[in-house]
Amino acid sequence: MNNFIKLKENERIDDLEINDLKIIQNENGFCFGIDSVLLSDFAKTIKAGTEILDLGTGTAILPILLTAKTCARHIVGVELQKDVAEMAKRSIKMNGLEDKIDIINEDIKNLTNILPINSYDAIVTNPPYMKLNTGLENESIEKLISRHEVKCTIGDIARVSTKLLKDRGEIYMVHRPDRLMDIMECFRKYKLEIKNMRLVFPKTTKEANLVLIKAVKNAQPFMRIQKPLYVYEENGEYTKEIKKIYNKN
């Protein structure tokens, strides 16, 4: 690992607690949360030797974690914001993963013009959850783009994914349950059939606040709903399953 990475103002290095991996984050920017960690674990069934594309990679948290959780041959992360993409590249260099991960500073809507069609085995994505003009928007442009569908919608994700995935290629997504109908409609429109779904609950007494989805391009309709995933025990501690995902057992 290269420990001689120069940090910029308000940046810090966080330990990912797996395979000695670390990541650079900006304290004033959009830092990764448990949703990315859960998605990386949900996607760990991606087959060995695959080509993976991460749409909206941010600081490259998903590609970095997936190098530890899968045996993918190569991962490409796509990030629209130049400063964030540059920070992701420094994290990859810091971890010595230049031969495994590439970062592209590009709008995902333009990817079909620069990447080979029907060429990726799997896509992962943790896209903006909130529709434009909903929720609080008095935040930095970086956080606004990360949280709201300013530059990337569910429809954009589905349309680009179906063009870039191989036949029977897989897409793994984490999103909010209140957007589930939008996701189902868009995915089926673009021949992405949802095969597995798992709802994530903060506690047994709370409503679900995340949904993990796996869809397959050109697959037949048949969906399996997995058992719920609970994050916290009633005493506020992580559940056994979450501790295992975070390698805290």
Image (cartoon, rainbow, N blue to C red):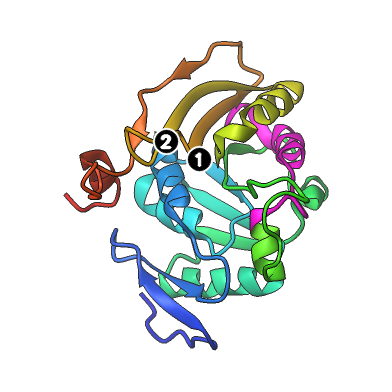
Q: Label 1: which residue?
A: 50
Residue depicted at 35% across the width and 74% down the height: 1
The residue depicted at 47 percent of the width and 73 percent of the height is 24
- Mark 1 to mark 2: distance in Å? 27 Å
Q: Nearer the viewer, residue 236 or 34?
A: 236
Count neighbours of disc 2 (C-alpha within 10 A) and say few if under 14, some if 14 to 19, many if 20 or more.
many
Lateral position of residue 245 relative to residue 219, left or right? left
Q: In the image, which residues are magenta?
A: 147-172
| Residue 13 circle label | none
- SS of the residue at dot 1? loop
Badge 1 crowding class, 10 Å Cα cut-off, few under 14, some 14 to 19, many 20 or more, is some
Residue 39 visible within the image: yes
* Residue 160 counted in the magenta span: yes
Give coordinates of residue 148: x percent, y percent.
Answer: 70, 53
Q: Is residue 15 above or below residue 196?
A: below
- Tag 2: residue type? Val
For label 2, the SS is: strand
Residue lying at the far left of the rendered structure: 249
State left or right for residue 96 relative to residue 78: left
- Residue 196: give x, y in percent of width and height: 48, 23
Residue lying furthest top: 221
- Nearer the camera: disc 1 or disc 2: 2
Percent across and percent down for residue 11 are 49, 81
For the residue marked with disc 1, what is the amino acid?
Thr
Whether 11 is among the magenta residues is no
Q: Is residue 207 above or below residue 65?
A: above
Q: Is residue 186 above or below residue 87?
A: above
Residue identifier under label 2: 200
Q: Is residue 79 visible?
A: no
Contact between marks 1 and 2 (CB within 8 A): the answer is no
Q: Residue at point 41% right, 50% down?
A: 37
- Residue 26 horizontal/vertical position (percent): 53, 76
